Amino acid sequence: MKITIASDHGGVDLKAALVEFLAASGVQVEDAGPAGKDSCDYPDYAIKVAMAVAKGVSDFGVLICRSGIGMAMTANRFQSVRAAVCATVDGAVTTRQHNGANVLCLGADLISVDYAKEVLKAFIATPMDMSDRHARRREKLERSERLSDVSLLAGTDPEVFATIEAHTNQEETEINLIASENLASRACREAAGSVLMNKYAEGYPGRRWYSGCDPVDAAERLAIARAKELFGAEHVNVQPHGGSAANMAVYFAVLNPGDTIMSMALDQGGHLSHGSPVNFSGKIYNIVPYSVDPKTEMLDYDALERQALEVRPKLLVAGASAYPRVIDFRRIREICDRAGCMMMVDMAHIAGLVAGGAHPSPVPYADFVTSTTHKTLCGPRGGIVLCREKYAKALDAAVFPGMQGGPLENIIAAKAVCFREWLDGTKAGYAEQVVKNCRVMCKTVQDRGYRIVSGGTDNHLFLIDIKASKGISGKVASAALDAAGIVTNKNAIPYDTESPFQTSGVRAGTASVTTRGMREAEMIKIGTWIADVLDDVTNTSVQERVKREARELALRFPAP
Ligand SMILES: *Cc1c(COP(=O)(O)O)cnc(C)c1O
């Protein structure tokens, strides 16, 4: 056991006695000061101890001032620190059992040295009470940061605070099945909201246009090194602000205006930035869309090869926003080689499945792999590009100065945090569970008579053909689900006859609910609710019942 202890000038004598007492009891004790009785400021010492506990380098902290109160106030501002002022042995035992206190604060003026030893002994010897009610309360205590983090805003800018409060409430009470969304970890959000946002850092680590970039250089190098390791990439650029920007960077790196790109059509599952006429990609380049097979609604690689040989594009783009099946990247490489074109894979949706080994990786095959970091990858909102070394220079120049100015170093740091969570085992089993959950939910809906595009799913999303199943549009269906507390989105399906505003499909995904810890049993419940609501979208009493039950379920699986 390791304990870090500190005091202010008023607690130096008691501290010395307790250091001796702990050392004699065989505890590893770190005295964080002060050494003498010169007047000093208690927060300076409370911060040292709180950081030791927050970092996990100490099991417990001890803080002493005249009352113990200022120390506790400071220490309790730190995440995962629970500091308690104790004047009695009973108090120490209770706060350990109930609150799981990990920092003991003592008032040197209020307690004798001998009794302080008894209190400290009881504090470190008492285990936490693991019963449901106390565990639940401790968890609520920890999770109060979702609002306490923005509580300054509540006073200074109530209007903006209200929006964050409303979204917090929404995350906690709704079942979110939007396939492109996820819930980033608390650690990711900390990095994203950090002071790194204040730094201008045009350029790349070691080659910046501004001074003072050492800390952000280190953050960006971490993000790059971790992304390389995670995906086995030769070169990585972590600066793109989003997935569309990542795609733009690749196009700018290797194409000229008017060059031909072959990509999956938007209504077939592709993305706006793959060449939609309303997007820059469709305006600048000559786009030749490819489609899925009308019968199987899956990619027909032989047909794709025939088309590529005829079109001879400069770049073939694989990857999609609404394709529920595994993509055979090895086969696409073969096609690109035969057609003599470069291969880009946009793995925005499946990056987390690739990172977690639940979908084959495109990295060994593609010249460029682009991605968002906020979908199944579960990081901050942003983009990355992975490429072969031979394209490194062209790619980096395309991002900066080609299309972006200063990178968002706070977001880059959050990307680094996200990559680490995949590398260090924090997300072990997640990707596989996302896929398992999706299969189960999809099958539950399918078994209730709904037509599923391509007959099922291999990844994190599935598409219900609601037009064929019930004769209503995706817009009407997703609105009914919304009213029942289940958030999906209307989505075009292959060869859709409805407009993009109506659509024939509803898209649902399991990334977000899996992050909350839901498993197969919950998927069956949610799938059943989806079918209950869609069976009759005009039945508001079903919607109200489902909304109540969905809310209860959501609250049992708190968002991080
Ligand atoms: C979501 C998505 C993107 C775009 O990401 P943004 O960060 O919104 O720009 C790009 N490509 C695909 C395939 C996507 O699904």
Image (spheres, rainbow, N blue to C red):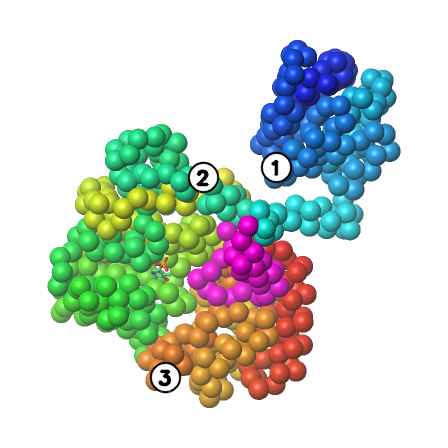
Q: Assign a secondary structure to mark 3.
A: loop
> Is residue 322 shown above or below 388?
below
Counting residues from the start of the chain, the first of labels 2 and 3 encountered is 2
**Residue 395 image offset from top left, x and y in percent:** 22, 46
Contact? badges 2 and 1 (CB < 8 Å): no
**Residue 65 image offset from top left, x and y in percent:** 72, 23
Q: Residues under labels 2 and 1: Cα distance?
A: 17 Å
Residue 175 appears in the picture as rendered: yes
**Residue 179 image offset from top left, x and y in percent:** 46, 64
Of the 4 image quadrants, the one containing the N terminus is: top right
Residue 422 appears in the picture as rendered: no
Q: Residue at position x 39%, y 31% from top? A: 215
**Residue 118 image offset from top left, x and y in percent:** 84, 23
Mark 2 — residue?
195
Residue type at mark 2: give it: Val
Mark 1 — residue?
78
Residue at the front extreme, as displayed: 156
Residue segment shown in magenta:
156-184
Crowding at mark 3 (Cα within 10 Å: few <14, some 14-19, many 20+): some
Q: Residue at position x 38%, y 41% from top? A: 409
Residue type at mark 3: give it: Glu
Mark 3 — residue?
498
> Is residue 150 shown above or below 261?
above
State the residue in front, 17 or 181. 17
